[in-house]
Image (spheres, rainbow, N blue to C red):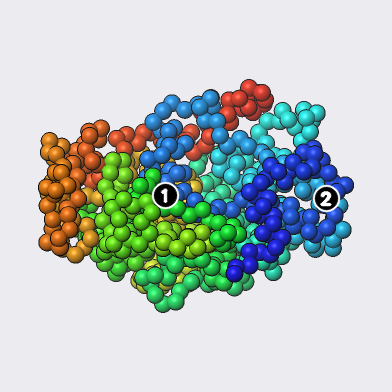
Amino acid sequence: MKKILNLLTIFSIILLSACNDEFMDRFPETSIGTENFFKSEEDLAMYVFNLYDFPGLDIYGDDAYNTSDNATTTGNTELKTMMISNPSSATITGGWDWEQLRSINLFLENADRADVPEDILNHYKGIARFFRAKFYMHKVKRYSDVPWYDQTIGTSNEELLFKGRDSRTMIVDKIFEDYSFAAQHVKTDQKSGAVDKWVVLAYQARHALYEGTFRKYHPELELESSANNYLEMAANLSKQIMDNGGFAIHNTGNPSSDYASLFVNTDLQSNPEVILTTIFEQDVRNSGFWAWYFGDYEVGPSKDLLQSYLMADGTYYSSVANYQTKLFVEEFENRDPRLMQTYAYPGWELINTETYSQGGGIYKQRLQKNFSGYHQIKGFVNDKSETVQESIDVPVIRYAEILLTYAEAKAELGQLTQGDLDITINVLRDRAGMPNLSLNPSIDPVQESRYTNVTSSQKNEILEIRRERRIELALEGFRHDDLMRYAAGKLLENEPEGLYFPGLGRYDLTGDGVEDIILLDLSESIPAAADKEKNSLGETFIYYRVGPQDSDASFYLNNGTSGTVGTVKERGTFVDPKYYYRPIPQTHVTVNPNLTQLFGWE
């Protein structure tokens, strides 16, 4: 049986996180009964574990639900709705929540009451400050300038209650002061799944890279001159983890499966690549797995992401003749092995059929309106066992991300060497069985067209590092933040596309050379079950009526009876720089007029 931190962790994370209100209601909200609490290390540990907010299996849908060019969703997302409407502070009402900050500050105000050695006290205060830094970084990403609070606020404290925004520079300085304190005091010898020094440094590096590149590529902030400070911090912190953390890329010499095994694993606690895992075990802390991104799904990977994967020999897919019109089976031939560990590929066998109406066996993707037709297997538990499904661990921070952060920061600084590539990008490529990347690679015109504002002297390297990051971290929830910090929001105006079909007729989807589906014109009807044809294997064809957007077709093709599968008629407009930020909800500005709007929001 897994040891989920320890019994205290089980109590605090499972019971308290599941019942936050019940836990907090045990004490008066204004004082949390300090005379009865904050006395021992057990009290401190119980409290900080209740601050844990690390993700679970939901990360595998975040590239769609947070809106990116990696995946599409039929569900509503904030940014997707913004781009096709006329948004305002009256319609964008989420995000302005401060409950967790109050809990953090309450702890920091009372932790000194505990009768514990100073190093233990500073360890727990460091964890609380880590969570405060992470909390505020989320607010900075969304609003840029926000009020800074490092104390709890009473109803009588009008000065703080009606405070205006503090500057981004001030807030970010405070964030990294918190991270620095945490990095100095949080201990390394913690149970698996708990915050330790390496977790702190990993988040600090992640957010330093974000802030450095955001400042560099967003002139509206007028902070470009300080960007390199954060890029240097990101490089230094990553190197500290690389040199001293004892982590390594998971590589057993099986490039066709090592990568995928990280995302469907019931025990990541001993995996050398995993810096932080959210641990699940059936009937103790269930993962909540269900196949919501497979079969009757809401999300689907995009063709744009698929086309970013290299050929197996390291050449660009865009250099292959007629790559835009490759059929589904052809798209997977001689590609980076990570593609077939991320997308359901021709010949893949489906075992867990819980949401897939076409049944198990060799996979035939289900085609339907507003979906790309591609299916995601990264993070998909292809196992019918409920015990396995409910016990899947989630790799919240992988060492792979640290290597990518280091390489990107060094390239943005114009300091990347071949040695740097060999200890970062090429370690990831070795795991995948891919050729190494060398300095000054040739430019892929498609990749260059995505990122037209790269200014580093090592532009060629940055383009390929960004590709590597997109592929290695695909569908783990990183892509939206990456597009925002690159100032590449305009890419979101491109409709996410799916499979290509040159016209009506019969097609092979399984890669065995035998046709599986028949595409009919809108004017035709799908035959009754008894009248459907069978292929040479004796299997009944799957019929689809195809047509343009807004027709009553089974699914849409962008040219009506040919072209790529269409997912949305109009993606809308990304307003630059306004949509890189969000307005403070109008109700809060009405109550506190000192909270002014920025970047054209009203």
Left or right of residue 28: residue 140: left
Camera sees residue 498: no
**Which residue: 42% across, 70% down?**
258
Q: Between marks 1 and 2, how big is the CA–CA gap?
A: 42 Å
Q: Quadrant of residue 540?
A: bottom left
* Residue 297 picture location, percent across and down: 37, 47
Pick the residue in front: 346 or 357. Answer: 357
Pointer 2: what residue?
A: 37
Front residue of this view, candidates 435 and 561? 561
Residue at 70% across, 63% down: 7
Q: Residues within 10 Å of mark 1 (few under 14, many from 20)?
A: some
- Image point (72%, 46%), residue name: 23
Tag 1 secondary structure: loop
Does residue 564 appear left or right of residue 157 in this picture?
left
- Image coords of residue 112 (percent x, y): 84, 53
- Going by the picture, which residue comes out furthest to the front? 530
Task: Give me the disc on residue 292.
Answer: 1
> Can see residue 190?
yes
Q: Earlier in the sequence, mark 1 or mark 2?
A: 2
Q: Quadrant of the N terminus?
A: bottom right
> Do labels 1 and 2 touch, CB within 8 Å?
no
**What residue do we see at 66% from left, 66% from top?**
191
**Amino acid type at mark 2:** Phe
Q: Secondary structure at mark 2?
A: loop
Residue 501 x %, y %: 18, 49
Q: Position of residue 458 (x, y in %)?
A: 43, 59
